[in-house]
Amino acid sequence: MSESARSDPNRFWNPYAAGVALGLVLLATHLVMGHGLGAVTASYRLGVATLDTVAPGHVRSVPALAEVVRQRSALDHWLVFEVLGMVLGGLLGAWSAGRLSREVARGPTFGAVPRLALAASGGVLMGFAGRLARGCTSGQALSGGALLSVGSWAFMFSVFAGGYITAYFVRRQWR
């Protein structure tokens, strides 16, 4: 994909329409499931299901892990399907905007392998942090923020502050 095609603002979804759609999904989730959006529970359950396949004895011996598989499969939870829907929705959104391609978004001075390594390590770090914070950024910001949770608002201000501070150190990689 050419640089002009990637930077063409007409190839993105309208942010207001996307925001309204996300708000309606959040409202529907609260009405139908009685809970807000989030992803950290799904990744945790996927990890427990994987560990249960490899070392079921260990899963049964750790109370926090055993609780997940005690009554049913670790993957038998609505948030697992929500995250699957997010992945499919992201693919559909990229495809419908003409932005679905096999490329690694990176700056001209930064290689694809380091970019993927940083993305993977950042994802793992966010997963652990999400479990410690009792919610991922989507759960804290969207669901907690919509419920006017003070802790969620403090979390999001911290996320944005951390993002701005980190951007100062890595922005030269994108020039």
Image: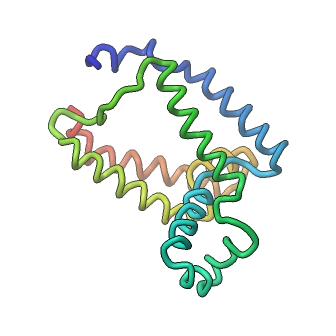
Pick the front one: 91 or 156: 91
> Which residue is painted at 26% across and 48% down in the image?
169
Picture quarter with the N terminus: top left
Q: Quadrant of residue 52?
A: bottom right
Residue at the farthest bottom position = 61
> Which residue is painted at 77% across and 51% down in the image?
35
Residue at the farthest left position = 109
Q: Is residue 128 above or below residue 22?
A: below
- In-image side of 153 versus 130 (left or right): right
> Which residue is painted at 30% across and 32% down in the image?
103
> Which residue is painted at 61% across and 26% down in the image?
18
Query: Where in the figure is residue 124, as x and y percent of width and height?
Result: 42, 60
- In-image side of 152 versus 4 (left or right): right
Query: Where in the figure is residue 123, as x and y percent of width and height?
Result: 42, 54
Q: Is residue 145 above or below residue 43?
A: above
Pick the front one: 175 or 136: 136
Picture quarter with the C terminus: top left
Q: Quadrant of residue 10?
A: top left
Query: Where in the figure is residue 88, as x and y percent of width and height?
Result: 56, 35
Query: Where in the figure is residue 157, as x and y percent of width and height?
Result: 53, 50
